[in-house]
Image (spheres, rainbow, N blue to C red):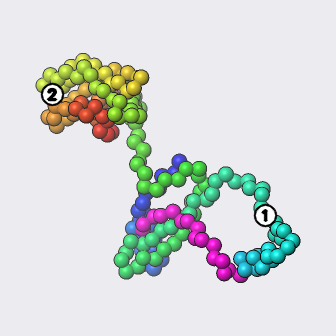
Amino acid sequence: MVNVPKTRRTYCKKCKKHQPHKVTQYKKGKDSLYAQGKRRYDRKQSGYGGQTKPIFRKKAKTTKKIVLRLECAEPNCRSKRMLAIKRCKHFELGGDKKRKVRPGTAALIVWNPSDCIVTQAGLQGEQCSGLVEVHTGSRHFSLSCCALVSGVASVYVISQAGLLIDRDTTSVIGYR
């Protein structure tokens, strides 16, 4: 899976310096009916005689090369250029960045936040006592190290998992 940011600082030939560029994926335009090859093909195909030109049927590749369209963000420039990158099956433009999990910590991913229920989170001053149980559908996780965030009683941090869980809405807020 390739994830490309929507903006990129790169060299602009017109400005003759590095500028921020807006990144979009290049898409092929609609074929013109009046191009010489199309006019010739249509004339040859007309009338009797069936298919006159070979139809390609030996496709070997399963992916296409991704082409990025870079547009200079400078208002007076707006020059565009193409940049081909390698082949990939899944291409994403401006998606969420991957979070690195530190070695030695357990990463908990809650697939359906609406099913997530936090129980046994008793408060004692600034710390939670005992274990915290996280129920996600059919799976149960018991985690320790639950601490209070910025004095708000409804929000807990499970530092072992690196997740912020809101006790009131019983959903995962985000990663730490």
Residue 125 lies, with reference to residue 25, above or below; the image says: above
The residue range painted magenta reads: 21-37
> Who's the residue at 37% across and 80% down the image?
76
122 relative position to 14: left or right: left
> Who's the residue at 29% across and 39% down the image?
173
User: Residue 47 location in percent, x, y?
Assistant: 82, 76
Q: Quadrant of the C terminus?
A: top left
41 relative position to 63: left or right: right
Q: Quadrant of residue 77?
A: bottom left
User: Residue 168 location in percent, x, y?
Assistant: 22, 32
Whether the magenta-drawn stretch holds residue 166 is answered as no
33 relative position to 114: left or right: right
- Quick one: SS at disc 1? loop
Mark closest to the chain's N terminus, 1 or 2: 1
Query: Do the numbered discs 1 and 2 sit on residues whose CB atoms are within 8 Å?
Result: no
Q: Quadrant of residue 117?
A: top left
Residue 20 lies, with reference to residue 88, above or below; the image says: below
Q: Which residue is mark 2?
A: 126
User: Residue 60 location in percent, x, y?
Assistant: 73, 53
Depth check, mark 1 against mark 2: the one in front is: 1
Q: Which residue is mark 1?
A: 55
User: Residue 124 location in percent, x, y?
Assistant: 15, 22
Residue 16 visible at all: no
> Who's the residue at 25% across and 34% down the image?
169
> Between residues 19 and 113, which one lies in front from this camera angle?
113
Whether the magenta-drawn stretch holds residue 32 is answered as yes
Inspect the image, locate mark 2, and give the three-letter code of the amino acid beneath it. Answer: Glu
